Amino acid sequence: MKVAIDKQAGKQVAGVNAGAGEAIGGYRRGAAEARSGVEKKLSARAWGKQTNLRTQVDAAGRIRGAASKPLSCVKQLRSVAQVGREISREVGQGMRYEF
């Protein structure tokens, strides 16, 4: 009887150990899957932030470029107006000498 009890106890211990091994393996696989998901989420978030930043920098450059064009036109118009005033002044002086 003692042999049968020891044999049954040994099988129960082996069964518990096997179950514990399966549980630990499952826990490890689950933890690895969760970690992978977190890493993917962080990677996607970083990519999104990088894309957002790149878009903002591009937009700022375009705004700056658009703002500088009117200033360039204003400078050109001032130059043309100054040349026009100079020509007008010279023509006016030339007319004074003739009269």
Image (cartoon, rainbow, N blue to C red):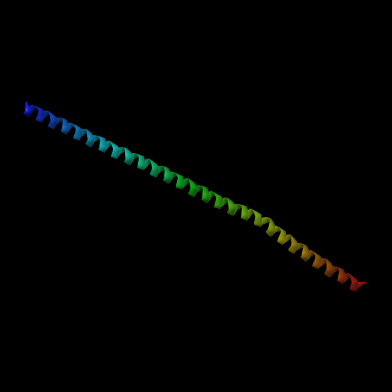
Q: Which residue is drawn at 42% across and 42% down?
A: 41
Q: In this rendering, is residue 20 above or below 57? A: above
Say which quarter of the image contains residue 81.
bottom right
Q: What percent of the width, then of the height, locates residue 14? A: 16, 33
Residue at the extreme bottom of the image, as rendered: 97
Q: What percent of the width, then of the height, locates residue 76? A: 71, 61
Residue at the extreme front of the image, as rendered: 2
Q: What percent of the width, then of the height, locates residue 34? A: 36, 39
Quadrant in which the N terminus is drawn: top left
Say which quarter of the image contains residue 96.
bottom right
The one nearer the camera, 44 or 87, is 44
The one nearer the camera, 88 or 16, is 16
Q: Which residue is drawn at 87% across and 68% down?
A: 92
Residue at the extreme top of the image, as rendered: 1
Q: Which residue is drawn at 44% across and 44% down?
A: 44
Q: What percent of the width, then of the height, locates residue 56? A: 55, 50
The one nearer the camera, 49 or 58, is 49
Q: Which residue is drawn at 32% across and 40% down?
A: 31
* Total numbered circles: 0
Quadrant in which the C terminus is drawn: bottom right
Instruction: Judge left or right: residue 36 versus residue 12.
Output: right
Instruction: Judge left or right: residue 76 versus residue 9.
Output: right
